[in-house]
Each structure stands twice: as structure tokens, then as C-alpha cells.
Amino acid sequence: MTTPASDSPYIGRFAPSPTGPLHFGSLVSALASYLDAKSHNGIWLVRMEDIDPPREMPGASDYILRQLQLHGLHWDGQVLYQSQRSDAYLSTLQQLQDRGLTYYCQCSRQQLKKRGGIHNYRCQLENPAEPTALRLALPDRCNIEFNDLFQGPQIQDVKQQVGDLVLRRKDGLFAYQLAVVVDDAFQQITHIIRGSDLLETTPGQIYLQQQLNYTSPQYGHIPVATNLAGQKLSKQNLTPPINHETPVKNLARAMSWLGLPVIKDANIASHTSCDELLAWAAAHWQRKLVPPEMERVASDGYQGDTTA
């Protein structure tokens, strides 16, 4: 069982990808990580995961930062941009390669699909001149256990259930699994609060942390927000951005989703600013209040009058 250091000061983070503006689901994730940090007198950082230019929307990074500020979600320190971290990623890849922990792979998505989508063997390259990905070679038995703050005990055989991790893609771009592990260590992140759609990626990240002698953060995966059809609220599902004209109402709805008794508190009616509402929420935040499953709502986050 992976146990993070308990004597470290709390450092949390929110790490959006600039593929579009924040929507209600991403606001919930940002708010949860912010409140968990502030309720523990911790530091809350923002990192922009801008390492996938083909998927990124021009101007989205700045727009996301403005959305956070508009909602009173002010981060500590400077924003870290992954697009400026190439040297760190290259150095880490070289370290892993020098230890014989990686191999080159030319398999296509179609080939992986025929094998159930799991790549758990070393490739034998037919044409080394063709573009290749770089994978982390996992041991045959790679059981990773950890205790999630919201989902409880977790165990995964990364080799058999996920496969050897891609560290650098065929197109030469750095993979998420590499960048997130390197940057969490660089920023000394102690707690990661994020959506449960990323729960499956966590054991692989922990294994990579172990190979690099990094201390693993404490993970907490909150249930993801879904629309009325049961789909995750996401940019891919054309979820509209949060309404920038109603930041207090947006926060109140997100807090209600996270189990905070926004309406039941007699003093909440006097909270007219985002800063006041966030201060109240940080004082009342409890992980145990977060429901195991979120109710479905309209794609814009509207739940009726219960959170108005």
C-alpha cells in the first residue's frame, strides 16, 4: 500500500488542459481541490497542462485563468505551464532509458484495439525509421495499492489492466502520464483532488513515481459531474462554459453538488461575494459530505431552485 508522507505541508493543485473554457464539471473539480487545500491551511497551485497543441484552443489558457479569478479561486504563486517544461521531461526520459526501463513502440490504435486496447509486451520494430512512441516497460506483476480519500482502498495490476505506459507519443509530444508525474514532484504536490474519471490512471502514475524515487501524493477522486443522459460533463460532449455573469450562483451550485449545506446555512443569504462564499465553504468543508455519486443535471449545471 502506497502511503505518502504525512508530515509535509499541504500543497494541492488544479491542472486544466486548455482545450476550451471551464464548464460546470471542471468548476466542481477546481472548487473541490481549492477547498480541500484551504480547509487544511494549505497552498493551492494552478498548472496549465498545455502539452497537446493539436487539441488546444487559442486563448483558452488565459480565459481559464480569468474564469478562476472571476470566481474568487485565486491561486498561490505562479502558474506553471507544461509547455515550458520540455527539458525536465527529456531529462526524465533519458534517466529511464539509461536504466533500460523503456522501449520503442510503433503499434497503431487499430492494432491495440484488436488486442483489447492493452499493450503489455515489448515491441519488435519492423522499420526503426518510422515514427515511434516510447513506453515504460512494466514488470509482469505490477500490483499497485493505495487508499483514495473519496473512493477508499484501490488495487490495480497496471500491467494487465492498463498496459505499459506511453511516455512520449508517436508525434513526439510528451504524454500526460510522464508530464503529470514529473510536475507533481517538481511542485512538491502532497494532495491531488480530481475527478474519478482519472482514477484508473493513478496506479500507473504511482508506479512511475516509485521508479523515479518520488514521494507519492495523497489522491482523492470525486465523482464526476454528468448530464441528464449520464455523460460526463466535458468539452467533447459540447458542455457549455460556465456563465461568467453569475459567479456566486455558479459557486453555490458547485458547493451544493459537493455536499455543502449552502441553502441550509442561515447565514448564507448574506454572502454576496465569491470571496465570502468561499471563506464560508472552506470553514465548512468535509470530505465525508461529498456524495458517492453525483445527481445528473442539465449540461449547464442547472439543478432547479435548490442551488439558486
Image (cartoon, rainbow, N blue to C red):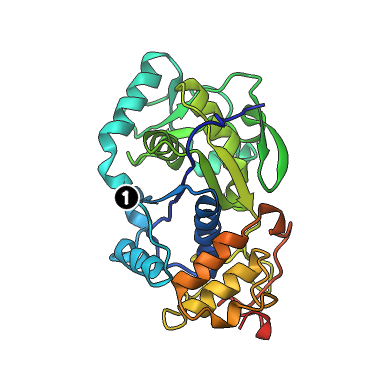
Quadrant where the N terminus lies?
Answer: top right
Q: Position of residue 200 (x, y in %)?
A: 62, 42
Q: Is residue 142 above or below residue 198?
A: above
Q: Nearer the viewer, residue 78 or 58?
A: 78
Would residue 128 be seen by someone viewing this image from the given angle? Answer: no
Taking the image as shown, residue 57 lies to the left or right of residue 176, namely left
Name the residue at the bottom extreme: 305
Q: Nearer the viewer, residue 34 or 93?
A: 34
Taking the image as shown, residue 308 lies to the left or right of residue 273, namely right
Q: Quadrant of residue 87?
A: top left
Element type where label 1 sits in the image: loop
Q: Is residue 187 above or below residue 256?
A: above
Residue at 38 percent of width and 56 percent of height: 75
Q: Quadrant of residue 266?
A: bottom right
Q: Is residue 253 above or below residue 150?
A: below
Name the residue at the top extreme: 99
Q: Position of residue 202 (x, y in %)?
A: 58, 39
Q: Position of residue 174 (x, y in %)?
A: 36, 39
Q: Nearer the viewer, residue 40 or 152?
A: 40
Q: Position of residue 162 (x, y in %)?
A: 61, 35
Residue at 72 percent of width and 60 percent of height: 291
Quadrant where the C terminus lies?
Answer: bottom right
Q: Which residue is under mark 1?
A: 77
Would residue 184 be seen by someone viewing this image from the given angle? Answer: yes
Q: Nearer the viewer, residue 284 or 154?
A: 284
Q: Of the residues shown, which amino acid type is indicated by label 1?
A: Gly
Taking the image as shown, residue 256 lies to the left or right of residue 38, namely right
Q: Residues within 10 Å of mark 1 (few under 14, many from 20)?
A: few
